[in-house]
Amino acid sequence: MKITKKCLCNGAPDLMFVCSGAADTAEIADRAVRQVHRAGGARMFCLAGIAGGVELIEANTRAAGRILVVDGCDADCARLTMEKAGYDGFSHLRVTDLGLEKGKSPVTAERIESVAARIQELFAIQETGS
């Protein structure tokens, strides 16, 4: 049985890529992106697929309406992965720029919600052009 893969190209969704690294700030970033995804604000997409050059993931990424890349710390692994794969023109959010410190920011619902709110705010700013 052949599996048909569907491209998201027609809908031009907003996509989010996140570093899901080992640090507490990366976990906060990951869980915030997942929260926004579940709420329908934008779609979480596969950063590993970008790094691996997966054709369908790349096609959908090129067709995205807007892209937000979220990193947990200043190593900027997600941003660098996207740039190395040839993507530019995306917005970037670094969790440590929001006042959280890598290795000293236990994962809490409050912190996840705060980062999720900032993600939603960034998409709203892009939408209004402010």
Image (cartoon, helix red, strand yellow):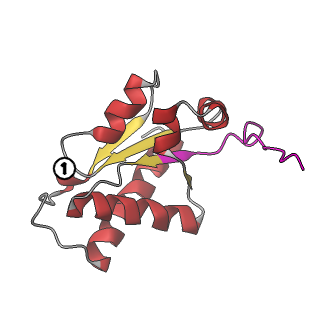
Quadrant position of the C terminus in the picture? top left
Tell me which residue sits at (60%, 32%) in the image. Answer: 58
Find residue 8 and report its horizontal and vertical position in percent.
72, 42
Q: What residue sits right under mark 1 in the picture?
A: 97
68 in relation to 59, above or below? below
| Residue extending furthest toward the front | 1
User: Residue 106's quadrant in the figure?
Assistant: bottom left
**Total numbered badges shown on the rendered structure:** 1
82 in relation to 110, above or below? above
Magenta span: predominant SS is loop
Find residue 1 and report its horizontal and vertical position in percent.
90, 50
Find residue 75 and report its horizontal and vertical position in percent.
20, 40
Give the secondary structure at mark 1: helix
Q: What residue type is labelled 1?
A: Asp
Relative depth, front residue between 17 and 12:
17
Residue 27 visible (yes or no): yes
Q: How crowded is mark 1: few (under 14 residues within 10 Å), some or many (20 or more)?
A: few
Tell me which residue sits at (26%, 52%) in the image. Answer: 72
The magenta span reads 1-16
52 in relation to 110, above or below? above
| Residue extending furthest toward the top | 86
Relative depth, front residue between 6 and 4:
4
Find residue 86 and report its horizontal and vertical position in percent.
46, 21
Tell me if residue 79 is in the magenta stretch.
no
Residue 128 visible (yes or no): no
| Residue extending furthest toward the bottom | 109
User: Residue 40's quadrant in the figure?
Assistant: bottom right
User: Residue 4's quadrant in the figure?
Assistant: top right
Tell me if residue 13 is in the magenta stretch.
yes
Tell me which residue sits at (79%, 44%) in the image. Answer: 6
